[in-house]
Image (tube, rainbow, N blue to C red):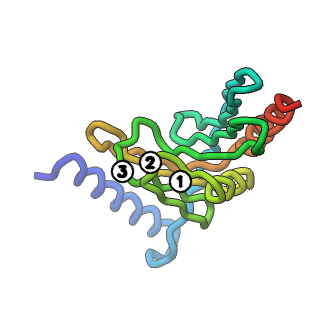
Amino acid sequence: MMGPTQLVLAAMLLIETTVMALSGADTASAPRRVAAVPMVWHVERLAGSASEHRRCSVISRGGEVTARLLETGQVQPPAWSVVVGFDNQPGSLRYLRINDSYFTSDEPLFHGAEAEAIVALLKSPGEFAFEWAQRPDYAKWLGLFGTGNFAVKAAECEDWMKGTRA
């Protein structure tokens, strides 16, 4: 007797074979690419007094990817950091692919030049994939999306940060 997963896989194979035979397509041809659904991003701002830090975050709809523009004082310019996941299993690998660029880390966030590169890539049209493990049971979370309105939201953060510095 077949289990539910085996039944689904068998049905998918049967349907695919039938469709390809009806369309006259070669079964050895390359697989078709499925378009990624564009991500919707939102912005959250946190402003303290002149001596405190300011933060503007661009957060994916499910909160799986967050780009934070942080200013810790007037000496250094604001800098981006990128967080993949939340309630991450300590030491687990965080994975992010944007178009053909790959980023991995077992640290809580990407920072410095790596974060700047990630933000620059997310600002361009394309797609990104992520994977991370959540505590306590090491459950894997993953997704594939288009970059969506990230560029608009990142510009909103950068403009807001410039306005708070005046």
Q: Is residue 29 above or below residue 120?
A: below
Identify which amino acid the numbered label 3 is placed on: Gly
Q: How crowded is mark 1: few (under 14 residues within 10 Å), some or many (20 or more)?
A: some
Which label was assigned to residue 142? Answer: 2
**Mark 2 touches mark 1? (CB < 8 Å):** yes
Q: How crowded is mark 3: few (under 14 residues within 10 Å), some or many (20 or more)?
A: few
Identify which amino acid the numbered label 1 is placed on: Ala
Q: Tell me the residue at 53%/55% (across/down).
A: 96
Q: Tell me the residue at 67%/46% (across/down).
A: 80
Please count the marks in the image.
3
Q: Dot 1: what SS?
A: strand
- Gap in Å between the C-alphas at discs 3 and 2? 17 Å
Identity of the residue furthest to the top in this view? 49
Foreground: disc 3 or disc 2 = 3
Position of 30 compared to 56: left or right? Answer: left
Q: Name the residue under label 3.
A: 91
Residue 163 spot, x, y in % from top left: 86, 30
Q: Name the residue under label 1.
A: 129
